[in-house]
Amino acid sequence: MFINTRYRSNSPEIMDDFEMEGDLLRDALDKIASINRLLGGNKVTLQGLRWLLKDHSPGNEVSILDVGCGNGDMLRTLADYAAENDLRFNLVGIDANNFTIKHAGNLSAEYPNISFLCADIFEEIKQPRNYDVILCTLTLHHFKDSEIIKLINGFMTQAAKGIVINDLHRSALAYYLFMALCFVFGLNKMSRDDGLVSILRGFKRKDLLAYSRDLGLKKYSIKWKWAFRYQWLIKTL
């Protein structure tokens, strides 16, 4: 059966239940992180961060918020990158699921520059907090169009240098390739079902361009990246 990807889906994902916990969720979080790493997803975010920090003085600390941090894999990747390049990163991960935050904290126990916060992101963007950069990796697609505009507006008030968004390209080919990956990686049913819904809730270039117009953005970049990702970079300087 041919899947129609013309419009974004509003179908819910099982992981959208912030009260969910247990081995099934832990396995899903870890598998998502592994697949993202294997397919180069972490590199897409790291490339965007490097672009925003290209004029940054290495001796100064950089504060980074990772929205929808999952098991914290992206933050650990950044901490390792900072250590290898003599950079000072203060890394904060936020997620609305307390079980997810605890799991991320356990996996990141050996990283003193990583901390985690369990909070509703819509409440968090109201707080008088400031970061140099805000990251949003595989998280934006969980929100509806009107919510995305609200979120990005909030991010722009808190991010001194900019925002890095790394999310899924809504594509029939990506949908069918993911079905094949499910067998290769042995994903559980929740991961399979949520992954397919995630792709249908992903974006086409025209969606990101429309958001950029609605937000009145002046300094931004939208690039397609493997594997079926869009890298949307926003400068706030």
Image (cartoon, grey):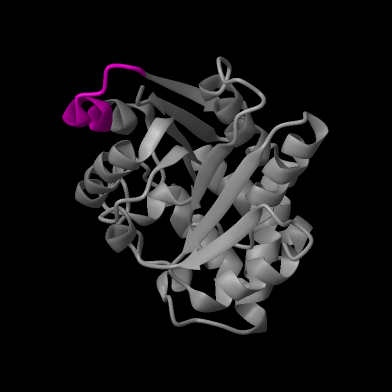
Left or right: 202, with 148 as reference point: right
Magenta stretch: includes residue 211: yes
Q: Residue furthest front?
A: 59
Q: Looking at the picture, does residue 153 appear above or below residue 118?
A: above
**Residue shown at the point (77%, 30%) measured from the top left:** 86
- What is the count of numbered marks? 0
Instruction: State which quadrant residue 233 falls in.
Output: top left
Q: Looking at the picture, does residue 197 appear above or below residue 175?
A: below
Q: Position of residue 197 (x, y in %)?
A: 45, 58
Q: Which residue lies furthest to the right in this view?
A: 84
Residue 46 in view of the camera: yes
- Front residue of 134/179: it is 134
- Front residue of 37/200: it is 37
Q: Position of residue 46 (x, y in %)?
A: 63, 33
Q: Looking at the picture, does residue 174 appear above or below residue 108?
A: above
**Residue shown at the point (33%, 31%) measured from the top left:** 208
Q: Where is residue 137 in the image (x, y as percent from the top left)?
A: 52, 45
Residue 170 in view of the camera: no
**Residue shown at the point (53%, 41%) measured from the top left:** 63
Left or right: 138, with 35 as reference point: left
Quadrant occupied by the C terminus:
top left
- Front residue of 72/28: it is 72
The chief SS type of the magenta part is: helix
- Front residue of 5/53: it is 53
**Residue shown at the point (61%, 32%) measured from the top left:** 44
Q: Looking at the picture, does residue 53 appear above or below residue 200?
A: above
Q: Position of residue 110 (x, y in %)?
A: 79, 61
Magenta stretch: includes residue 121: no
Instruction: State which quadrant residue 184 falls in.
Output: bottom right
* Residue range highlighted in magenta: 210-219
